[in-house]
Image (cartoon, coloured by chain):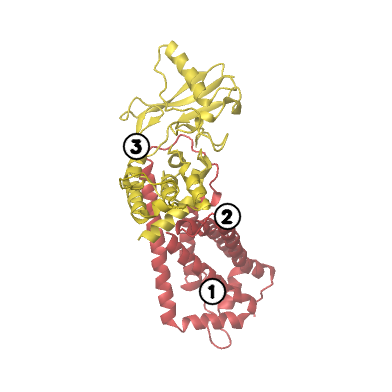
Chain colours: A yellow, B red
Amino acid sequence: MNLTLNVWRQRNAQDKGHFLEYQAKDIGPDMSFLEMLDQMNEDLIKQGSEPVAFDSDCREGICGMCSLVINGVPHGAQFQSGSAACQLHMRKFKDGDVITIEPWRAKAFPAVKDLVCDRSAFDRIIQAGGYISVNTGGTPDANTIPVPKPAAERAMDAAACIGCGACVAACKNASAMLFVAAKVSHLTTLPQGQVEAKERVQKMVARMDQEGFGHCTNQSECQAVCPKEISVDFIAQMNREYLKSL
Amino acid sequence: MAASGAALAGFVVAHLAGNLQIFLGQEAVNRYAHFLKSTPGLLWSARLFLLAMGALHVVTSAQLNREARAARPEPYAGKAYIKASPASRTMFASGLIILGFIVYHLLHFTFLKLHPQYGQLTDALGRHDVYSMMVLSFLNPLICAAYIVPVFCLCLHLSHGLSSLFQSLGINTERSRAGLAAGAVVFAWGLFAGYAIIPIACQLGWVKLP
């Protein structure tokens, strides 16, 4: 199939950026969305043009590097929910489609180049409190701290977050609540994480605000685009933890 | 936002309970109105509290709106929504309509500046005849429309606001979220039915002048 792509081009962080139209030719239905971009880039290189920069790493939906807003929705979740853009295949499109591709847009995720943005704000939120302090010493025996099965399951659901930032990209307020809630809930649900629960939620929320993310108005767009389908229930849990910590 | 919204929603419920006394007849409505007027301490503390909550709600929404705009300086070329409800996407617009309606509504029924011809009536006991004021007002189809449309916006606003409240205050759990959200929507539209039935009843002649 042949497609028309409207792709965001931006030389660097200072550049204003603009859309450019490209033709993607002879795209097979079994290609992933990123492979389609690879093929388009190869054509661009052959023509002597600068290829389009985009983030990718594992290409199997688990690393959280891909960050494309496809026709106004992060990861193209309107075509296929619960997957990252790398797992979206071209069979979801048809010949002659016009596809608009933009980067994540948020003040806290400054543009780097084309479709690449800087998501280190998430790393700084984790550094603020998204960990469990462990004193050094001998390795403790496994299972010395009993973890109830429902807590283990729930913590694992939250831990599924791959930190891609689609929640921020989808939110009309560019809020990072789903990401921070997943991290807070993951650790606070486990007995090992309860020791620092109050401090953690305070520090992580403060850092989130400091990074310039917006607030949550409970539209659940974040959950709808999340490749790991993290539930907004964790946002309620974080709000509860926050109120308890005051 | 959530706390002030909850207080205001509480008032919307209490106000409906007062209004629905129209179905009990002239005596009930006028007695209730007279009771409110004759306890100025209670009336004015409620009014000041509501004014403060309303102001807080408007100020926090303006502040959050400003933060949200700052958080995304460069907009998307084409933003598409896949989950957000129509009510949640129109909160700002419905809020502005409600604000305008409150001013109109107070000028109409509280300060008696608009449509004053309905506001000067007294009943057999010499009390302000609120019952006749309501019925006469709602016999005018234009006043009915100017009432029902903003009340629709109010209930649309509440249908998102009430479910949002449980989330923001951390009341929702995995088990309760779907139920509370659905309950909030049903509750909001129940309020709309309760408010809308009054002008409809006046128009259809179910509620008559004494």
- The answer to whether marks 1 and 3 sit on the same chain is no
Q: Residue visible at 47% across and 48% down?
A: A155
User: To which residue does mark 2 refer?
Assistant: B178
Q: Is residue B101 visible?
A: yes
**Disc 2: host chain:** B
Foreground residue, A43 or B134?
A43
Query: Can you say whether A44 is above or below B19 in the image?
Result: above
Mark 1, secondary structure of its residue? helix
Measured as percent of width and height from the top left, residue B13 is found at 54, 69
**Disc 3: host chain:** A
Q: Earlier in the sequence, mark 1 or mark 2?
A: 1
Rendered image: mark on residue A120:
3
How packed mark 3 is, by other alpha carbons closer than 10 Å (few <14, some 14-19, many 20 or more), is few
User: To which residue does mark 1 refer?
Assistant: B117
- Quadrant of the snapshot with the C terminus of chain A: bottom left
How packed mark 1 is, by other alpha carbons closer than 10 Å (few <14, some 14-19, many 20 or more), is few
Q: Residue visible at 52% across and 51% down?
A: A149
Query: Can you say whether B138 is above or below A14 in the image?
Result: below
Mark 1 and mark 2 residues within 8 Å of each other at the beta carbon: no
How packed mark 2 is, by other alpha carbons closer than 10 Å (few <14, some 14-19, many 20 or more), is some
Mark 1 and mark 3 residues within 8 Å of each other at the beta carbon: no
User: In the image, what residue type sits under mark 3?
Assistant: Ser
Foreground residue, A208 or B198?
A208
Query: Can you say whether A86 is above or below B135 in the image?
Result: above
User: In the image, what residue type sits under mark 2?
Assistant: Ala
Marks 1 and 3, how far apart in space? Answer: 66 Å
Q: Residue visible at 58% across and 77% down?
A: B131
- Quadrant of the snapshot with the N terminus of chain A: top right
